[in-house]
Image (cartoon, grey):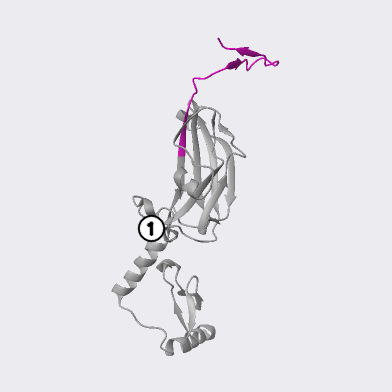
């Protein structure tokens, strides 16, 4: 009890913007013992409050500040197009469709967009205020489903990687994933699923699928059951 009294005597407890009610401080009593769990709240000395640096605001103004913060918070993951990658001197962009045997992009560039980003505004795609800057890492996982297994939702793991944000041409917050070093080409017909997730964030996970069609240009066949694996030319 003495500890809690001193806390309230010399400090104010406040919940920062962006911290939900359920993560604020909690004063509880159990079996006659009182405890205070600060959790994500912050303690502010009374001297700071008395100095006049803290101002009371109406609930409307508070809600307005919360909305401004929400608009700037990380909301979605976006992949840069081939045109935007060229502007950054990056060789790569993930296609929507491909043919079996098509070379995979050398790199894939992902960014985190704030809630106030509108994808219809093409001129804003590389605007820094629409690319969230942080130290959070992002993961990319690549899985494959062939046309037969896709019906039964079977998948084969191809590649996983975790990268930190980097910068190109003074633009920060770029997540550059090397791809061709592990997946040189889209070898088989089916669906390659690329899953992007921002670590330790509520940002929505992005799943981008590449539909790969069988190529009509087949130069040779092999017998899969023959240990000698002799090639046969197609006529």
Where is residue 137, by image quadrant? bottom right
Please tell me whether residue 58 is drawn above or below residue 171 in the rendered image.
Answer: below
Where is residue 228, by image quadrant? top right
Residue 81 shows in this picture = no
Please tell me whether residue 96 is drawn above or below residue 117 in the rendered image.
Answer: above
Segment colored magenta: 209-235
Along the viewing direction, whichever of 206 and 134 lies nearer the viewer: 134
| Residue 163 x %, y % | 58, 52
Disc 1 element: loop
| Quadrant holding the C terminus | top right
The residue where tag 1 is placed is: 115
Q: Given the current orientation, which residue lies at the most extreme top position?
A: 235
Residue 69 shows in this picture = yes
Along the viewing direction, whichever of 220 and 210 lies nearer the viewer: 220
Please tell me whether residue 141 is drawn above or below residue 136 in the rendered image.
Answer: above
| Residue 35 x %, y % | 51, 76
Question: Does the segment drawn in magenta span residue 14?
Answer: no
Q: Residue at x 32, y 70 (%)?
A: 64
Where is residue 131, by image quadrant? bottom left
Q: Residue at x 33, y 79 (%)?
A: 57
| Residue 226 x %, y % | 67, 14
| Residue 82 x %, y % | 46, 43
Q: Given the current orientation, which residue lies at the most extreme left position?
A: 60
**Crowd around label 1: few <14 · some 14–19 · many ≥20 (10 Å):** some
Question: Does the segment drawn in magenta span residue 224?
Answer: yes
Badge count = 1
């Amino acid at each position: 009890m003495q500890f809690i009294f001193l806390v309230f005597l010399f400090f104010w407890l406040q919940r920062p913007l962006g911290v939900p009610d359920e993560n604020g401080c909690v004063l509880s009593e159990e079996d006659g013992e009182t405890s205070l769990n600060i959790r994500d709240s912050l303690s502010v000395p009374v001297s700071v409050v008395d100095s006049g640096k803290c101002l009371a605001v109406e609930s409307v103004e508070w809600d307005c500040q919360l909305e401004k913060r929400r608009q700037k918070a990380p909301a979605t993951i976006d992949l840069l197009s081939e045109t935007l990658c060229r502007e950054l001197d990056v060789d790569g962009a993930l296609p929507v469709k491909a043919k079996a045997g098509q070379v995979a992009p050398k790199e894939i560039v992902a960014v985190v967009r704030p809630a106030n980003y509108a994808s219809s505004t093409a001129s804003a795609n590389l605007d820094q205020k629409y690319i969230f800057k942080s130290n959070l890492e992002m993961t990319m996982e690549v899985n494959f489903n062939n046309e037969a297994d896709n019906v039964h939702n079977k998948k084969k793991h191809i590649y996983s990687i975790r990268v930190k944000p980097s910068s190109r041409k003074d633009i920060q917050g770029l997540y550059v994933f090397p791809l061709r070093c592990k997946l040189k080409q889209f070898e088989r017909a089916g669906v390659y699923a690329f899953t992007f997730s921002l670590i330790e964030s509520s940002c929505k996970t992005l799943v981008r699928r590449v539909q790969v069609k069988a190529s009509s240009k087949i130069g040779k066949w092999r017998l899969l059951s023959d240990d000698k694996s002799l090639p046969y030319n197609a006529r």
